[in-house]
Amino acid sequence: MSEKVKVTNLVKTFGDNEVLKGINLTVQNNEVVVIIGPSGSGKSTLLRNLNKLEEPTSGSIVIDNVDIARDDVDINSVRENIGMVFQHFNLFKNLSVGENIMLAPVELKKEAKDEAEDQAKKLLATVGLEEKFDATVQSLSGGQQQRVAIARALAMNPDIMLFDEPTSALDPEMVGDVLEVMKRLAKQGMTMVVVTHEMGFAKEVADRVVFVDDGQILEEGTPEQIFEHPKNERLQDFLNKILNV
Amino acid sequence: MKRKVLTAFGLLAMFATILFCLGLPGSKAQAKTYQIGTDVTYPPFEFANKSNKYVGIDIDIMQAIAKEEGFKVNVKPVGFNAAVQSVQSGQLDGIIAGMTITPERKDKFDFGTPYYKTGAVMAVKKGSDITSLKQLKGKKVALKTGTAAADYANSLKKKYGFKTVTFDDSDNMYQDVTTGNSVACFDDQPVLQYGIKHGLKLQIATKPANQGWYGFGVKKGTHKELVQKFNAGLKKIRANGTYDKIVGKYLGTTANSKVKGKTFIIGTDVTFPPFEFANKNNKYVGIDMDLIRAIANEQGFKVKIKALGFNAAVQAVESGQADGVIAGMSITNERKAQFDFSKPYFNSGVVMAVAKNSKIHKLSQLKGKKVAVKTGTSGADYANSIKKKYGFKVVTFDDSNNMYQDVTTGNSIACFEDHPVMQYAIKQGTKLKIVTKPALNAPYGFAVKKGHNKALLQAFNTGLEDLKASGTYDTIKAKYLGADEIKTAAKTSGNSAEDRTFIGLIKQNKGALLSGLQETLWLTVVSIFFATIFGVLVGLMGVVPNKFSRGTSTTLIYLFRGMPLLVLALFIYTGIPSLTGQKIPAFIAGVVTLTFNEGAYIAAFVKGGIQAVDPGQMEAARSLGLPFGKSMRKIILPQGIKIMVPSFINQFIITLKDTSILSIIGLLELTQTGKIIIARNLEGFKVWTIVAAIYLIIITVLTWLSNWVQRRTKV
């Protein structure tokens, strides 16, 4: 296994508020890393730093041997290889489902329209929504939207996918479909960093679980280590609260 | 009893005779009076003006020289031939009568230094196809006896085979040509020029020939001292400019060379009858208007009248947007600090007027009451100067109609206005009456910016004197104020004959209203076009991730949204030219004003519209690797614009309405058109109703259109 992402001493402050206090994290190729932690612990911020939706305050984020924290990096071409899925899907409301998926390939890879259309339809098929190609975004349920969002993120053939609480905004009955798609992706060997509260998903799919609290990584390990034998007191606390609701 | 009276009378007579005898030699020593003969009518050299006083180049030169040299002249208009004979017989001391110096005359006269160069020209009836002497063969030609031009014609008579008819004065000679009895006449060039300028229906057909000089003559061998004085005086008045002034006054040749052919922009009030108001054909007329046009015509320049409203006109002159202002403007010391005034052309005074049925008839009854005045007028100054003393309050209006209205409706108890204006308004049907005598007698003057446009001012003065001399001035004044002429004025403004129903008013003013509407729409469309460009640019600058650009955007929006449109319009129209010295046409100033003002609002909602798009949309686009600009174009703007559409349509409607404010800088859009129509017919309620209805109709149509667009853009 080789290193896909290496985060070193990552600090992020918003004004006086230090949200990330020196994060060190490595993600191997084909590895699925799940980040868990209480609300406001900084896990989403950490994820958003990985494609520079948030500008790192200090530290380095090396992806494929390039430190993207530096100012002189062409962040747009870096992002083409990093897919991202948002909590609130963020599908483009002015575009149809198909157009949402085709936008980046057509605009950035200059793919021919019919080619992009074929690919978009295939991607929609993999998330089980091939019949929705011409549908408007507004006509889809939350779960369907999130699956389209995953398809959109995959359209650029990224070699790493970031998931920012992809199921938190969904009705419970929709969660399963989305997780199913994610599991399939993991099985296909996609490198994934997932911020989630779905502990079942973490146990089943994660190669490694990372517990973040108060802007720091307090513990990391295999799902078994984290969920069966948590060492850190705050992790124990957190798991107690989450699992005994 | 009878004897006593007789004795007393006799004593008195003796006493008077003694006094007379004692006094005469004394006055003779001081200032001798010379008897000078001249022609009856030989304009512009000598003619009687309206008040039957003899004026003209000859007379004025003679008087000026006499004044310069300390003697007196008594000019006797006995006719050219009679004057010549009287000088020869010793009854008169000298002759000045546009008399050309010829060798023959030199045998009988001693001439002073030649004072005017002239030449003989042939004139024919206006529209005649005679252009050369050859065409005169077998025709009759009119001449005036004893003139150099007649001599010239007689010398050609044989060669060209024409007959001559002689007249004793110019008028009859001219008449003979205009009636067609004669086909042409010969006269001195300046004389003909002057006559044609003053309405003579002739045209000059040849170049000046037989050029010669006019001279002042005395009987040969006599009055040497008079000739010497004449020569000395002529030299002096030539040196000190009096000569040029006199000639310029009548012919406008010297004084107006600087203004000749030029076009001057003259600012005036919108509504100040009888001095300025639009007549039925929407042309500006009135004492001021007729006067300035007559002077311009006289002095050979052109004027472009801009009815800006009094204050705007004054400011336009200060800022150099206009060259002069003629707007019933009283000459005051304060104004003299900013303006150079012409000689007064009208004497006015402030009167108080009250509603027709009011019992108020003196100032002391005003205590605790409200009084209406018009901003910047001497009526306002007067009212303000006495308001403490009489304890009344002052309400200020921007034009006369609103002020009158305020009194007739009873909001104010009285108003102060210039006497002629008030008189005219009452005659036009304003339900007010004048209750005080004119106070604060104030002369009206034409004004230019201090230290600027000297030539124009001088031309005005010269022209004014000329008009006064020729009687045109009195004619103009009488046309608007004279008892008989009031009816004519009323007729031109159609007060009595006009149909004053809504339909009648619309019919009469259809053309004016339509062109006003057209200007309004054109202003709106052009302005909204530029405002959109400006607004979208500034709005976009407000959302790009760059501090400087965002700051600029915020500042621009703050500045132009925070400034009242009226202030902005005045600032751009009158403020900027006074800084740069560059004139801005009113239309452009109007468009610039609206571009900035409406553009700032557009920028604000463009910015707001973009910011209203869910930030997740931008994040999602950026996370796919789309650059900022592309994300903006493909994702954010299409969604933002949908949010903006209603605001944009709203702004379009607001812009249409806001164009009305530009009436302040004299743009002839719908509102200004309304103002002008009301200025003429004083039908405020009806005309404003019509104007309001037009705005409403247009805005209704626009609203329908906007609803349609909105339906189309909704997905």
Image (cartoon, rainbow, N blue to C red):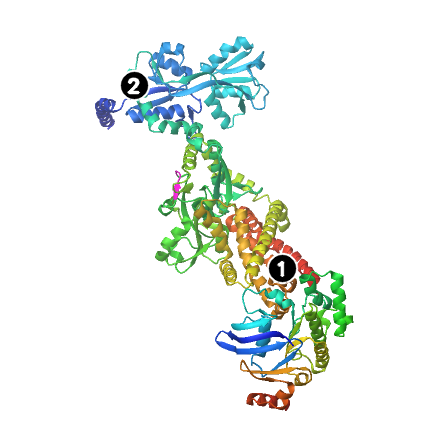
User: Does residue B449 appear in the picture of this structure?
Assistant: yes
Where's residue B113, x and y in %? 35, 18
Image quadrant holding the N terminus of chain B, namely top left
Q: Secondary structure at mark 1?
A: helix
The residue type indicated by label 1 comes to: Ile
Residue designated by label 1: B649
User: Does residue B478 appear in the picture of this structure?
Assistant: no
Q: Is residue B241 above or below residue A210?
A: above
Where's residue B533, x and y in %? 58, 55
The residue type indicated by label 2 comes to: Gln
Nearer the observer, B607 or B65? B607
Is disc 1 surrounded by few (<14), some (14 to 19) or many (20+) residues within 10 Å?
A: some
Q: Is residue B449 left or right of residue B125?
A: left
Tell me which chain the residue with mark 2 is part of: B
Tell me which chain the residue with mark 1 is part of: B
Q: Secondary structure at mark 2?
A: helix
Q: Is residue B488 above or below residue B430?
A: above
What secondary structure is the magenta-colored segment mainly? Answer: strand
Nearer the observer, A47 or B261? A47
Where's residue B147, x and y in %? 45, 15
Is disc 2 surrounded by few (<14), some (14 to 19) or many (20+) residues within 10 Å?
A: few
Image quadrant holding the C terminus of chain B, namely bottom right
Instruction: Report the magenta residues as a range.
Output: B339-343
Q: At x 46% / y 57%, what residue is drawn? A: B412
Q: Report, in whole angstroms, how far the alpha carbon at label 2 lies from the one at label 1.
A: 85 Å
Residue at far front of view: A1
Q: Is residue B124 left or right of residue B118?
A: right
Residue designated by label 2: B228
Where's residue B490, x and y in %? 54, 42
Which comes sooner in the sequence, label 2 or label 1?
2
Residue B378 is inside the magenta segment = no
| Quarter of the image where one finds residue B106 | top left
